[in-house]
């Protein structure tokens, strides 16, 4: 019985082995170079031989050939399937498509969530600003004393101005605040996105709180006649950095909305569907935070003129907006 099975396997293999070897060589070429770089005739033959080997595998299973032959055919079939049907796009193509299509299209599809994040930030800034004007002691509630380093309501106007423009003071005061603000905003961006799935509230509240910090800090300087100067200082990196928070918040709100209002889908399916765009928003926010880190680390120190600070900060903001609004539109 076993001898007869081996003889059937040997005869079955002898009749088809040439095509299997040829397919194996083509699969190796496709794995090494990629199907898109193969000659058309070779790629066409690969697809045809793949169909033949699947038939051989089905027959081999039906007539119960030896295990070694079945293992070989199963492995060859799996490799050929991946060569023919697996996505052929390389990492460079995926990254390029993200920048030219996926990211800006996701931003446009979810603009309402991003606007909601902007509104949460803006309202928080208004609240922080007004609370400070009502009672300056609120400043220390929102901004810890070790962070303020004496640049609070008790500081003189001259010392506040010196921190903004005096190169020797940059490592203290606003320099420390900028470092704290970036690390703080990075954590906030992660939290507002990750916690957004919990009924939206944490994402909106954290973004609101972040706005309160900015509002209180701005109110301090406006009260001393330094609002324009601080605005320029913040614009260099803050336009990009704070926009990233709002976009991350938008991604979190997208997830939270899917949980609250799944529609005809289960909540798990709705969350999975919403996650496709939400993750793209999170990646955009991460990219913007990296850009903000570079701006905070170099441009803020090198640029001292407030007008140029505004131009650089808001000019870069306009470039982000142009990317979101104009890139990846299909021609009609």
Image (spheres, grey):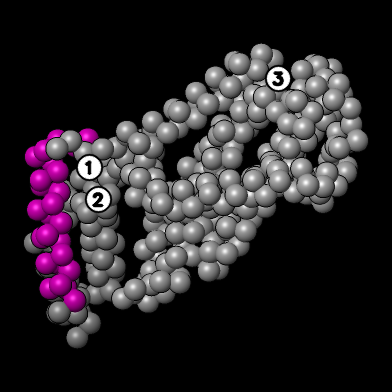
Dot 3 and dot 1 residues touching (CB under 8 Å): no
Q: Disc 1 versus disc 2: distance between alpha carbons?
A: 7 Å
Q: Name the residue under label 2.
A: 83
Closer to the chain start, of discs 3 and 1, is: 1
Q: How far apart are marks 2 and 3 (CA)?
A: 52 Å
Report the quarter where the N terminus lies: bottom left
Q: Position of residue 208 (x, y in %)?
A: 63, 53
Tell me the distance, in whole angstroms, between the alpha carbons under discs 3 and 1.
50 Å
Towards the viewer: 145 or 22: 145
Asked whether 59 falls inside the magenta stretch, the response is: yes
Q: Which of marks 3 and 1 is in front?
A: 3
Label 1: how many Cα within 10 Å (few below 14, some 14–19, many 20+)? many
The secondary element bearing badge 1 is classed as: helix
**Between marks 2 and 3 in the image, the one whose residue lies nearer the viewer:** 3
Secondary structure of the residue carrying numbered label 3? helix
Would residue 139 appear left or right of 150 to someone viewing this image? Answer: left
- Number of numbered callouts drawn: 3
Find residue 161 and report its image quarter: top right
Taking the spot 47% from the left edge, 42% from the top edge, the residue there is 284
Q: Position of residue 299 (x, y in %)?
A: 64, 20
Q: Is residue 101 above or below residue 112?
A: above
Question: Is 81 placed left or right of 112 in the picture?
Answer: left
Residue 109 relative to residue 236: left or right = left
- 119 inside magenta stretch: no
Please provide percent x and percent y for residue 47. Answer: 13, 52
Q: Residue at x 44, y 65 (%)?
A: 257
Q: Give the range drawn in magenta.
A: 36-61
C-beta proximity under 8 Å, tags 1 and 2: yes
* Residue found 36% across the figure and 40% down from its top: 104
Q: Mark 3 points at which residue?
A: 301
Question: Which labelled disc corresponds to residue 35?
Answer: 1
On the question of residue 160 being in view, the answer is: yes
């Amino acid at each position: 019985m076993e001898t007869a099975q081996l003889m059937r396997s040997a005869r079955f293999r002898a009749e088809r082995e040439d095509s299997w070897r040829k397919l194996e060589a083509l699969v190796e070429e496709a794995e090494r170079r990629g199907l898109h770089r193969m000659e058309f005739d070779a790629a066409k033959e690969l697809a045809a031989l793949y169909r033949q080997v699947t038939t051989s595998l089905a027959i081999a299973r039906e007539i119960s050939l030896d295990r070694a032959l079945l293992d070989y055919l199963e492995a060859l079939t799996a490799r050929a399937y991946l060569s023919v049907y697996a996505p052929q796009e390389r990492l460079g193509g995926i990254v390029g498509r993200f920048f030219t299509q996926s990211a800006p299209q996701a931003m446009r599809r979810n603009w309402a969530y991003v606007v909601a994040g902007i509104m949460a930030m803006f309202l928080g800034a208004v609240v922080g600003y007004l609370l400070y004007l009502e009672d300056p002691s609120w400043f220390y509630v929102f901004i810890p004393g070790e962070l303020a380093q004496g640049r609070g309501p008790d500081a003189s106007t001259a010392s506040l101005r010196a921190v903004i423009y005096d190169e020797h003071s940059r490592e203290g005061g606003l320099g420390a605040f900028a470092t704290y603000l970036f690390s703080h905003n990075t954590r906030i961006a992660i939290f507002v996105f990750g916690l957004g799935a919990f009924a939206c509230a944490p994402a909106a509240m954290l973004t609101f709180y972040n706005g309160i910090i900015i509002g209180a800090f701005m109110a301090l300087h406006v009260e001393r006649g330094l609002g324009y100067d601080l605005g320029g200082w913040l614009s260099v990196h803050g336009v990009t950095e704070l926009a990233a928070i709002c976009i991350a918040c938008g991604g979190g709100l997208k997830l939270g909305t899917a949980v609250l209002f799944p529609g005809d889908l289960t909540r798990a399916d709705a969350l999975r569907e919403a996650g496709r765009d939400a993750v793209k928003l999170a990646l955009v926010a991460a990219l913007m935070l990296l850009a903000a880190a570079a701006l905070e680390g170099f441009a803020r120190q090198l640029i001292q003129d407030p007008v140029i600070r505004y131009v650089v900060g808001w000019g870069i903001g306009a470039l982000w907006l142009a990317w979101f609004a104009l890139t990846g539109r299909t021609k009609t």
